[in-house]
Image: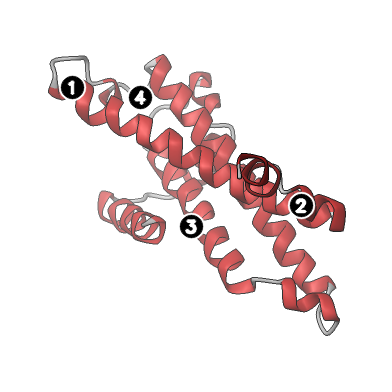
Amino acid sequence: MRRVFLDEVVLHRSLFSVSRFRWLRHTLIFWGFSAMFGLEILAVFVREAWPAFGGEDIWEHQSHPLRLAFDFGYDFTGLMVLLGCIMALCWRVIVNGRPEQKYTDTWTSMFLFLVAFSGFVVEAVRLSQVAPDPIYWGSFVGYPLSMLLSEFQITDGVYLMLWYLHVLGSC
């Protein structure tokens, strides 16, 4: 059972032998999502439990090194999911009308793409509210996107609505 788990769930070996492209997109989505889930569990402890027991609330300090490390982790894993979804959607277009079309999961890929993309938009809106600083390059997707959004006056209400849409989609 351990061998099957390692080969089929962790490494997707049989899928690799069928199609390296399908293997890559599945691996990006699976490991990107799994790593992000694990990162979020850890972040909950840092955000909620640590301050509850008297520790410093690092989430209040946007330039705290640990907070920036979490931002990098979220961007990296989110980009993995986003790229995997883009690959899946492109593959869907390529195999349209062929027998391989039965292996597509278009609606799920679109949904995961929208959730990942909305996360980058929420992060960009959050970063557009702070003064530009190279320290935020840990958010290597959200920070450049925030430069584009800094031209717009985005209210706290719009930010909150975007945040809720992302969180509800994530749940």
Circle number at residue 62: 4
The residue drawn where x is 20% and y is 27% is 49
Kind of residue indicated by mark 4: Gln
Mark 2 and mark 4: span between their CA atoms?
A: 37 Å
Which of marks 1 and 4 precedes in the sequence? Answer: 1
> Is residue 127 found left or right of 155 in the rendered image?
right
Question: Please, what secondary structure does the residue beneath circle 2 have?
Answer: helix
User: Where does the C terminus fall, quadrant-wise?
Assistant: bottom left
Residue 75 percent location from the top left of the image = 54, 37
Which of marks 4 and 2 precedes in the sequence? Answer: 2
Front: mark 3 or 2: 2
Which of marks 2 and 3 precedes in the sequence? Answer: 2
Answer yes or no: is residue 116 visible.
Answer: yes
Mark 3 and mark 1: span between their CA atoms?
A: 29 Å
Is there a contact, CB below 8 Å, between mark 3 and mark 4?
no
Mark 1 and mark 2: span between their CA atoms?
A: 41 Å
Question: Please, what secondary structure does the residue beneath circle 4 have?
Answer: loop
Q: Label 1: which residue? A: 51
The residue drawn where x is 28% and y is 53% is 160
